[in-house]
Amino acid sequence: MFKWLEKNLPKIVMAPAVGLIGWFVYGFVLWTLYISFTNSKILPKYELWGVGQYVKLWGSRKWLIAVDNLLIFTALFLIFCVVIGIILAIFLDQKIRAEGVLRTIYLYPMALSFIVTGTAWKWILNPTLGIQKMFIDWGFQNFTFDWLVNREMAIYTIVIAGVWQSAGFVMALFLAGLRSVEDEIVKAAKIDGANLFTVYWKILLPMMRPVFFTSFVILVHISIKSYDLIVALTQGGPGISTTMPALYMTQTAFHKSQVGLSAASAMMMFMAVAAVIIPYLYSELRRENAR
Amino acid sequence: MFLRWFLYFVLILFALYFIFPLYVMIVTSLKTMEEIRQGTLLTWPSGLNFDSWAVAWGGRGYGAGDTFLKPYFWNSIKMVVPAVFFSTFIGAMTGYVLTKWRFKGDQWVFLFLLFGCFIPFQAILLPMARTLGVLGISNSVIGLVLVHTVYGIPFTTLFFRNYYISVPTELVKAARIDGAGFFKIFFKILLPISAPIIVVTVIWQFTQIWNDFLFGSTFSFGEAAPIQVALNNMVLSSTSVKEYNVDMASAIIAGVPTLIVYVLAGKYFIRGLTSGAVKG
């Protein structure tokens, strides 16, 4: 008995973690999947109902708006975060004075919650007392900036706040990537007469492929999950114009009490994330094994 | 030379953009509503007026409808401390086993745990709500501790596993030949050299859990809510006049703990951020 215990101790120590994750992650996802195939309203029902909830979901105007918003947000969020992140990383890589201070400033939003920063942005972007008033007081009488309360434009305020929060993160990833390149490569290229621009454009950035890939995966993952920022900034409004899937899911479940429908939307989100993450984990693991 | 100036110009411009919301938050929190209406976002406050901070933290002193952050701040502390402790401890143990007591298929077990880092939590909210109800701990700090511990395990495992993998296995083997057992090796050999990764993990978990809103708002309401939920409720509750100075003071109070940790231990924070992301 004691021998057996000693031999299997590592596995026994592992058991709680594996059990908890097995139940609370995989078990729960399957549970949600099951609910999505039932006609659950306020309380879960457990008779199968088929794919009715998915049909309903993709026929819902609000869900289509949510998906639309997600696509717009993801595209802009990706582009701006990556472009700003790369510019900052390359510029910081030029033996800049006070690099540490600047880096700290670029990254501090990552330490704050989206609720905190969303509250701040909401105040800055509100038309009566925020940026609009600032420009009018400075003498630009016709200046208008009412995106926050404008149905067509409100989604872009979420992009502004989201990019502000996450661009520094991309900078940190690229800076770490650039610093890991050996100096010899850059020196050799300079001896061959390449200027700084060519060195980055032709040599260093192409070497950053894994970093691009990582940034892409992380940013898409953040954007699919984005919830807090929208709650703090717009609550999905004006109207339903800034609804995104994560917000749709919780509203449908906890305000509209359409549990089955919200489970279906949760599964769509799950599949979207899985489609991005599984290839990523696979390639990371292969890279590790190759080493 | 021109290029140097251009570099600094762009870098400082971005620095201003990043610092702008924080600046606005701080100056707004120090103004009276009268000053806010008369000046602009950037106007310097007339003095160090901490009234709105006092209101945000301790309320106005009348009974009904007076929400303030103090009790919720303590809720968050009561939630964060045990959740960080348990998830870090479990992560250290699993990381240790996965690297130093390898078994057949351990790669798959690691992948199994790792996937938990990425799942959209919407896919587990409904079963979790039900489970917490059955356990009788919905709308309680204990429930949130459980939730945050469980969903922190994938991250903490990842951190410790990637750290311990670079510790020479020969050390462990030699200790084993000397007759040291599973726990003795952990406490005598690995734990003493684990300080950096413990710091990274604790900071990461602290920041994540302190800043969480989804779990807090779904599984708690009223008196058991953590601070982010309370902040959101305070800002959204539409009393007759919107008091932006109090809103900003509240936001700063809710953000200050993680901000302090970031300023003091930014190096470790960034390490967690990049290793949580880059490595798999």
Image (cartoon, coloured by chain):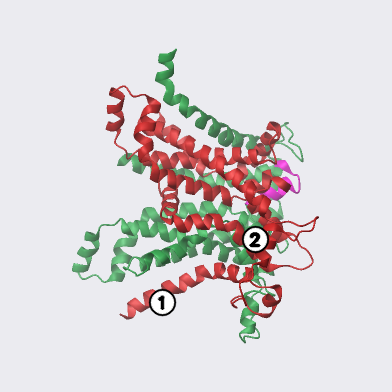
Return the residue at label 1.
B9
Give the image quarter of residue B171: top left
Element carrying mark 2: helix
Element carrying mark 1: helix
Which color was chain B given? red
Pick the front one: B195 or A86 = B195
Location of the C terminus of chain B (image quadrant): top left
Q: Nearer the viewer, mark 2 or mark 1?
A: 2
Q: Chain of mark 2?
A: B
Given the current orientation, which residue lies at the most extreme left position? A191
Which color was chain A given? green
Question: Can residue A251 be seen from the camera position used here?
Answer: yes
Question: The magenta stretch spans which residues?
Answer: A246-260
Give the residue type at disc 2.
Answer: Ser
Given the current orientation, which residue lies at the most extreme top position? A1
**Residue at 21% of width from left, 60% of height from top?**
A184
Is A146 included in the stretch rendered in magenta?
no
Residue B106 location (% of width, % of height)? 41, 31
